[in-house]
Image (cartoon, rainbow, N blue to C red):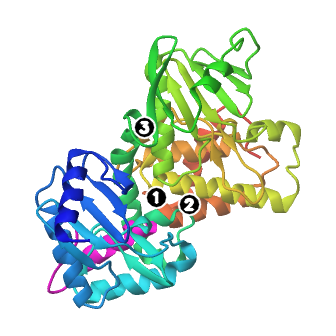
Amino acid sequence: MRRDEWEGMAAALLEGSLPPGAEWVKRSRIRRVATVGDVFIKAFPLHRTAAVREARNLARAAQDGLPVPEVLAGDVRWVAMRRLADPRPPSRADLPELLEIVRRAHAAGWVHGDMHLGNFVRSEGKLFMLDWQRARRLRRAPRFLQLRDFGFLAQSLGEPLPEALEFARRARDRRQRYLWRSRSGRCVKESSRFTRWEIEGRPGFRLREVPDADLRASLEGLEASEPLHRSSRTRIWRRGKWVVKRFARIPNARAAWLGGHGLEVRGLRVARPQAWAGHWLWMEDAGPESLEAWFDKDSGLGGARVRQELVTALTELLIRLHRRGVYHRDVRTSNLVWSPGQEAILLDYGPVRFGRRVSARRRIKNLAQINASLPDTIEGGLRERALKDYIERVGAGDAYEALRDEVVRISLARKHHWSGC
């Protein structure tokens, strides 16, 4: 293709139309990407420097020996690159090679600025780094910016955090706190993942892959049937593959929709919210019974090994919540599902608060909630070891004995499973 053909394609993309023979790769208000033949074109309708920066950075990165796409041409608001043959996304198995490329970039003075898994692609047996419009080349890449890149990469890999990236845990956690604010808000905006809809004249949003007709059908005769749970604030039913909740107040339903997606962004397991409109919330059915129901049915809890695994899973849940700045006002076993070999899954995510840190008072409250809702079958030694593990990884303002005594005091004040034995 000649430059004038690339310019014509770029002009069409900037206007929001697809040139003949081209295919969309990504289309948004900020960036429009398409391919035609062996050419990959990115257009930036709102930014007059992004295309220039990307073309310049790609050329300089190639000179530094980094694996990047070849730039063919560009202008103020578009850049054309050679399309990579048979591209496929990398996975956690590619981590050693990913880390080697990132370290090479840092050694050359580069700071990428958006170093997540989606900005790498494997083609013809080789990994390539993409999206260089935010990158900067410095005389020397500062350590804190290197850690920021590694934190972005660690966050995109999900859980568990690979041992090779343990050094970037704090940077990863900071990234997750930021992403809650930037990404959870996307669930109340029209996008490629979410779409507006309404029920009973009340607006809301749903995942695009969840059929509107199925959601409406799930409500037929629902309120006339007996709910699984009833309180002054909510009623809950199981309907097919979903759990359906009706909230007394619309703001609470909306808060739960936001909270569920916010927890997911921060890498926490939840019964994924599927749709929300007005008073109604549809959630993924995470299992047949809550932990509390399991305790009521089986006081032995499947033996000592299972009890140990359960306490470890619940401790890990609290550590993840608190290290990621999440406070859940009601994190007890009636709001959790767990099975051996799995992570604990949160069922109720309306009463959550996101911030930079969780106060000591709130951390103690959550510890007491979990402790009080575990039955007497969970022996004291397991509880002691779990609290010590929590303190070692999260920290506490008080000495161990003082913190333990406060958790015990609050636990006994709660009327639940544990009797203090």
Residue reaching furthest to the top:
224
242 vs 134: above or below? above
Q: Quadrant of the N terminus?
A: bottom left
Residue 109, given in percent of the width and then of the height, sits at: 21, 85
Q: Which residue is mark 2?
A: 390
Q: Which residues are drawn in magenta? A: 133-154
119 vs 406: above or below? below
Q: Which residue is mark 3?
A: 187
Q: Amino acid at mark 3?
A: Cys
Residue 386 visible in the current orientation: yes
Pointer 2 with pointer 1, Cβ within 8 A: yes
Q: Earlier in the sequence, mark 2 or mark 3?
A: 3
* Residue 176 lies in the magenta stretch: no
* Total count of labels: 3
Characterize the local packing of mark 3: few (<14), some (14-19) or many (20 or more) Cα atoms within 10 angstroms.
many
Using the numbered discs, state the Cα–Cα distance from disc 2 to disc 1 in whole angstroms: 9 Å
Q: Amino acid at mark 2?
A: Tyr
Residue nearest the observer in this picture, 51 or 100: 51
Can you tell which of label 2 and label 1 is closer to the viewer? 2
Q: Report the disc number at residue 168.
A: none
Residue 402 visible in the current orientation: no
Characterize the local packing of mark 2: few (<14), some (14-19) or many (20 or more) Cα atoms within 10 angstroms.
some
Q: Report the disc number at residue 396.
A: 1
Q: Earlier in the sequence, mark 1 or mark 3?
A: 3
Q: Quadrant of residue 6?
A: bottom left
Characterize the local packing of mark 1: few (<14), some (14-19) or many (20 or more) Cα atoms within 10 angstroms.
some
Pointer 2 with pointer 3, Cβ within 8 A: no
Is residue 399 rendered to the left or right of residue 133?
right
Residue 72, given in percent of the width and then of the height, sits at: 23, 76
Seen at 46% across and 42% down, the residue is: 193
Can you tell which of label 1 and label 3 is closer to the viewer? 3
